[in-house]
Amino acid sequence: MTDFPDAPHDFDDQRLGALRQRIGWLCHALRLAAAAYCVWILFTIVSFWSDEALVVSRFGKPLGVDVSGVTGLQRFEAFSISFLVWLLLTAACYSGWRLFSAYLEGRIFAVSSTLWLRRLALFGLISALVDIVARPVTSLILTAHKATGQHIVSVFVRPEDLSTVLLLATLLALAHIQKTAADIADENAQIV
């Protein structure tokens, strides 16, 4: 019935069908959104870092320095940092895909589902924190061609960064709570 080893054996097809009717559209929509988000972000970072004029205009004001003359190598190095963040986001989205796939199989409160939820939260949290830390590194890369004294280390945290970190930390806590509940349920099932 399922490729998950801890799938409930007594979860009959009728109940699974009823569950899918209730949550199937949501799970499919979120899986599609996760995949589309990964593709969209990759397209965004590739098109941004390949456009020197866009890089100069977007980074010149926030850094307070003219970054014109930035080389292709500098943009590639900055792209590499953005790509690393994208890889972490992709791992979070993959974890979300697996989580909602497990839900579609009827494994709402199973231990393995909580582990996918934990992975989603951890990869998301790590990518958000790496993104924040990468900003000063990116600013150093983009000003490396400037004369001494014009190298800028721009450290900034946006309000949406804090809300993202808080949301992902809450999701991580929820994953821990659900795993504890699933472990207790498994222990009780073994006793009976």
Image: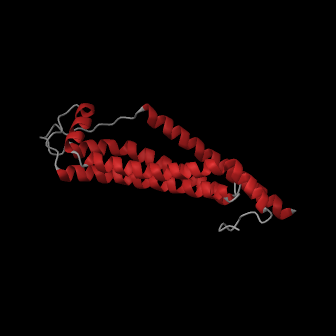
Residue occupying the point 56% across, 49% down = 30
Q: Is residue 87 above or below residue 67?
A: below
Q: In the rendered image of this protein, does residue 1 appear above or below residue 44?
A: below
Q: Quadrant of the N terminus?
A: bottom right
- Residue 149 image-quadrant placement: top left
Q: Residue at x 21, y 50 (%)?
A: 74
Rendered position, 59 above or below 101: above
Position in image of residue 59 (x %, y %):
25, 37
In the image, what residue occupies the spot 23% across and 38% down?
Answer: 152
Horizontal and vertical percent for residue 99? 60, 55
User: Horizontal and vertical percent for residue 15?
Assistant: 78, 56
Residue 46: % across, % down: 30, 51
- Classify the position of the C terminus by image quarter: bottom right
Mark count: 0
> 145 or 18: which is nearer to us?
18
Horizontally, residue 77 falls left or right of residue 23, namely left
104 sits left or right of 67 in the view: right
Position of residue 122 in the picture relative to residue 107 (left or right): left
